[in-house]
Amino acid sequence: MTDCQLYLISPLDVSGDFAHRLERAIDAGEGLVTAFQFRVKGLGQHEAAGLAEPLQAICAARDVAFIVNDDIALAKRLGADGVHLGQGDGDPRDAREELGREAQIGVTCHASRHLALEAGEAGANYVAFGAFFPSTTKETEHRAELELLEWWSEMVELPSVAIGGITPDNCGPLVKAGADFLAVSGAVWNGDEVAAVKAFSEQMRAK
């Protein structure tokens, strides 16, 4: 059985019945989903916080880490479990100062060993590599190879997250290569989230 876990990334629209869908997705994984990233764009802090709170409560009740994308101030306001930083979103050291020792801080490192090692030195808790496949969620400039995951898992203890176009059908090699987490969005939210998470579970736990 693999130790690889599922890291859900929200769609940009988390209004309407999304809270119910999130509950269904987490519960369908029976412990496979261990992190959820709140990723919305272009909203004010107040509006974003209002959308985040019910989702944060769902995650807290299920022991799923609630991570805010890109926004250290919002993560602090919400008392979130952590923040995920892109390369242009600030320094992990600043995030650590703002959010405290317990915060989970992740950094997007594209396909770069150098950026990942730098992030680790700056105190990140995990690094994200990708995209491994073309993504339906956003344009991908960087493509990462399986060798990068293999090298990282052998050489560095810091957990790695694989991201970018990952589906139940193509996730197997990433698990075998040593990814600690698979970050998924479209593969879950663009259809039936329960069926999608169960399909991931089947593939990931078979490895």
Image (tube, rainbow, N blue to C red):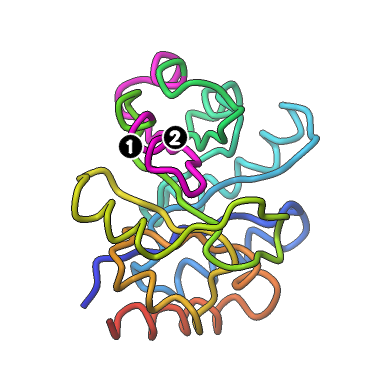
Q: Is residue 184 magenta?
A: no
**Res 191 label:** none
Instruction: Tell me: residue 8, above or below residue 114.
Output: below
Instruction: Tell me: residue 187, above or below residue 153.
Output: below
**Which residue has dot 1 on it?**
125
Per the image, label 1 sits on a secondary structure element best described as: loop
Residue at the location (71% across, 36% down)?
A: 48
**Res 82 label:** 2
Three-letter code for the amino acid on which mark 2 is drawn: Gly
**Residue 1 lies in what quarter of the image?**
bottom left
Residue 94, horizontal then vertical, whole percent: 46, 15
Q: Earlier in the sequence, mark 2 or mark 1?
A: 2
**Magenta-highlighted residues:** 95-118
Q: Are the residues tagged 2 and 1 within 8 Å (C-beta)?
A: yes
Instruction: Tell me: residue 102, above or below residue 4.
Output: above
Residue at the location (51% across, 46% down)?
A: 110
